[in-house]
Image: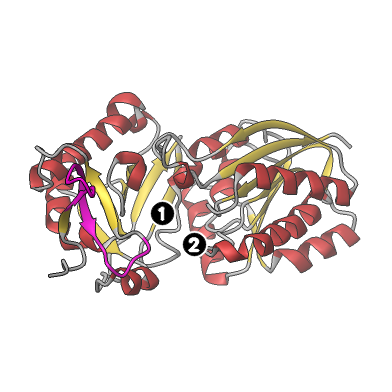
Amino acid sequence: MRPKPGAIVDVVGIDGEFIGRGFYSGHSRIAVRILETDPNVPVDAGWFSRKIAQAVELCRGVLKLDAVSDAWRVVHSEGDGLSGLVVDRYNDLVVVEFFAAGMFRHREWIYDALREQFPGCRFHSFADEHVQKQKSFDLHGNTTTEASVITEHGIKFRADPAGAHKTGFFADQRENRQWLSEQVEGKSVLDLCCNTGGFAVYAAGRGASEVIGIYIDEDVIQIAKGNSHLNNVRPKFIQSDIFPWLRDASNRGEQYDVVILDPAKMTCDRDQVITALKKYLDMNKLALGVVKPGGLFATFSCTGLVAEDQFLDMLRRAAFYSGRTIQILKVAGAGPDHPFMAHVQESRYLKAVFCRVVN
């Protein structure tokens, strides 16, 4: 009899030797997500309790994240040995995202393990519709979860599961926001694809002389303005597609000391990677055109299927086509609470490149 989606199964070789234990998903491209390779260790409530405790110990004991923020990635799927599960903490709100039927099927074990680490926490759980269809499970998420206000390096943000994509706040950029904010005092800053204002609010809070944020969705712009009010700063947010806005700004001769380009994920389809790289090339070429000589340019990609070397090559071509010379100062990624295993490097998704535009 074929196991049900999400059932815990043992995988053995043709010689009968034990290979591993994990979640079965017959309709998925990943038939079994291996969780445990010791045949003597059951995957049960105690197993989840130990694994989640280890993940929290990384954040609290090793990385000391409580000292800088009350928002961080608790469980980063394969990076924490819990394939198919992502958990983020936003103050007292714990957001659980399921990518596998097995994680959803055993969610009460997960909730119990999280309550042990975060007593009195609130939960918000969700899974993208295409994931539910592909992995054969059905989650009716809560759409009325109250927002939480978090603090990161002294800057406040609203994390609202009901108000924006996911929560509207992304802890993976924590270190990148902080590093860049240390470079902006007294400077003009342009935050393209600003979303809910992460980089823009940081820049305004760190003494930038002028901050402009551009985003296509007016509802998200309103969230960004709300984050500004939380910090008593006043960046200017403009609802626009960045392509026509940048062309117009270039025609007007506008240039900025610091330009940030952090677009949403371009694709989840391997067949569309070349198309995604062309989009990155077009937007980076335009963005480089509005950086002052000697200014800083920070460009990002959260498209996991685009490799770092591909992204850097795209940036080289964007500089060439825009007639700019760029000096790469730093290449980074997601914060250390988003670890990846050496044998699962495809889970390293965020690319962050900080440049100086020489001329």
Q: Which residue is mark 1?
A: 158
Above-or-below relation of 297 to 26: above
Q: Is residue 258 magenta?
A: no
Mark 2–mark 1 CB contact (< 8 Å): yes
Where does residue 270 sit, x and y in percent of width and height? 56, 61
Measuring 30% from the left and 30% from the top, which residue is drawn there? Answer: 58
Report the magenta residues as a range. 10-29
Measuring 68% from the left and 64% from the top, which residue is drawn there? Answer: 275
Q: Which residue is mark 2?
A: 223
Measuring 90% from the left and 47% from the top, which residue is drawn there? Answer: 323
Q: Amino acid at mark 1?
A: Arg
Q: How many marks?
A: 2
Crowd class of label 1 (few under 14; some 14 to 19; many from 20; radius 10 Å): many
Where does residue 280 sit, x and y in percent of width and height? 70, 56
Measuring 49% from the left and 58% from the top, which residue is drawn there? Answer: 226
Q: Going by the image, does 344 lie left or right of 331?
A: left
